[in-house]
Amino acid sequence: MLTKTQFRLGLSCANKLYYRNTKGYVNQSVEDPFLQSLASGGFQIEEYARRHFPEGKFIEADYKEPELAITKTIEAFKNDGAYFEAAFYHNGLFALTDIVVKQGKILKLIEVKSKSFSDSDRFLNKNGTACLSSWKDYLYDLAFQVEVASCAFPDFKIESYFFLVDKTQKAGVDHLSQMIRLSNKSHADPRKDVKVSFSSVEETGQSLMILKDMTSVITSIRNGDIEYSTGIIFPRALKDIKLVYDKGEYPNYPTRLKVCAKCEFKTKSLIDEPDGKSGFAHCFKHQHGLVDSDFSKNFSFSLHYGFDQESPLFLSEVIIDKEFDPINGMSRSDRRLIQIEKEAKKDKRPFVLMNELQDELSKHEYPLHFIDFEAGLGPLPPIKGISPYQNIPFEFSHHILYKDGRIEHKEQIILADVGQFPNFDFVRALKSSLGDKGTVFRYHNYENTILKMVMTQLEESQEKDKQELINFILSITQDGNRIGERNMVDLQKIIYRYYYDPATNGGNSIKDYLPAFLNSSEYLQSKYSKPIKEINLNSLNDLDGNTIWIKSKDGQILDPYKQLPPVFKHDEKELAFEGTEDLEVKNGGAALVAYAYLQYVDLPLSDRNKIIDALYRYCELDTLAMVMIYEGLKNIAV
Ligand code: SF4
């Protein structure tokens, strides 16, 4: 049976549907619904949505028993009411729904989305002829459900709705976030193993959800009047995808670099590996005549800041009609040019704008502070007056590099007690740790964004020291033309402007640059291959100072992140933070999962402590990595 999940996969690329259903192909997408639901807060929002229908009943059937679910749905629809997880089937198509309200001959299909929405947001382009890309999957998913339901119940009128989180609403009570919790039993079902400590939504104040009638939009989609993307309309897409599914043959759908760049049916080496075959290699061999050795070259989709549809397959063949002309450091196009040139010449040495780098580094005032934040999400707010889906900064780490080379792991804070709203205490602790002297470094914009968000919350709060905290935030942040007198310096920007290492392959994250620096800098290799107590570096997580951050194996420097211990167990499977980074959640899926575990799952104390210890270690490495990168740059610039 073709499900809505498979239909959506087929919409993204019909070849993917073939690989998903053919044995032996690697699939890198994280398909753990438990983790995804936990990280995004989906399980809370789904349960909260169901509580709007207090008389609602589950169609009790395991998702592995579609026939039973279909039979029970037909039986249930003999009576009016609200039903959760009703199942529809028609001619090889199967759709499970979130909420269906049956009223006589009307079926209202309600799709719950843990996505926030306000009335000024749109679903379609200005002409109303195509879905906006952020909504297209959801809209076509709902159209699929309506299609199946309409065919399965042809005598009924089908209406369709989105039930979304209203980001303009504010919690009417304290501790709402803790009123829907997940049990810690193994194999907990985030849809059903939830404990709810209110009986009606009214008890919690104004609803945080908004019901959007999508009936006319979905009718237009089903009629083929609203495109999914250029040239793709619902009736034809459904027919084609169903055919691919039924035949089970490779459909030879044309490659599109933009989609292929993110294809989940890739292996690490891009070609077939003992653990599984590569769909990516199959497509490019089949359609472009490539052979195994071609996959060791970089594809043009690794070009910094993307590529256009006309790009050749390989990076070394891309031509950019522009001169390398770094004024005030490298621009985006300069970095693209240098990346292509290094690739074409097979030059693996880093590129440095030396004078500019020296000049930049001379501006910083010791002691140098390096900070990194981790934040969780609050789908349901922890305190009254706060909107859904606020970032909740709950952890920071702080390293100081002194002029004499000493490095101090100055502070690490985790504020994640159950139900805690830590944002103001977080800023207090940060202010105290940073003192008032020395340049402060962040890596990219996240810390700036989070602090500005907390500033807005402070402005609306009654905190006694709110002006002091606001002044502190103003001093270390920037916003448009406003630049604080001690504005944080973005270390990533320094690298971006003055330094390029081909080993990063166009990536600019700390996880790209740390291994690149460690591999290219003899200074760092020599220093960090000794125990930290011998190199004037302390760790709040290793008071004896025996940690050695750089280790090598077979002549290769091991990535320090990969040496950190796993964080927690789920379904007998050790999960490292790294594995969760594939979750499509902004600002680090790992921290979101960890935060959600600490807040919304009834964990034994030993498990909580294990997660907290691991979080400390990861955050410590994030700020130490910044120190290492800074030292690496400094060493180059002497
Ligand atoms: S490599 Fe491209 S064409 Fe092949 S399955 Fe992946 S996205 Fe589709």
Image (cartoon, rainbow, N blue to C red):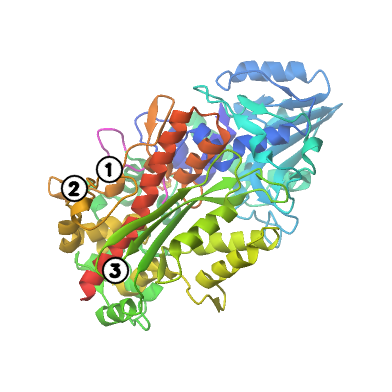
Ligand 1 neighbours mark 2 (CB distance < 8 Å): no
**Between 264 and 616, the one nearer to me in the picture:** 616
Mark 1, secondary structure of its residue: helix
Instruction: State the extent of the magenta-drawn residues as a range.
Output: 262-277
- Label 3 near label 2: C-beta < 8 Å? no
**Between 129 and 120, the one nearer to me in the picture:** 120
- Quarter that holds the C terminus: bottom left
Mark 2, secondary structure of its residue: loop
Find out whether residue 272 is within the magenta segment: yes
Q: Which residue is drawn at 68% across and 40% down?
A: 175
Q: Which residue is drawn at 36% across and 75% down?
A: 365
Depicted 575 relative to depicted 57: above or below: below
Horizontally, is 65 left or right of 351 in the view? right
Quickly name the residue at label 1: 563
* Marked residue nearer the N-terminal end (3 or 1): 3
Give the x, y percent position of residue 363.
35, 79
**Predominant secondary structure, magenta span:** loop
Mark 3, secondary structure of its residue: strand
> Given this view, does label 2 or label 3 mark the residue nearer the observer?
2
> Given this view, does label 3 or label 1 mark the residue nearer the observer?
1
| Marks 3/1: CA–CA distance | 26 Å
**Between 223 and 102, the one nearer to me in the picture:** 102
- Label 1 near label 2: C-beta < 8 Å? yes
Q: In the image, which disc is placed on residue 551?
A: 2
| Marks 2/3: CA–CA distance | 24 Å
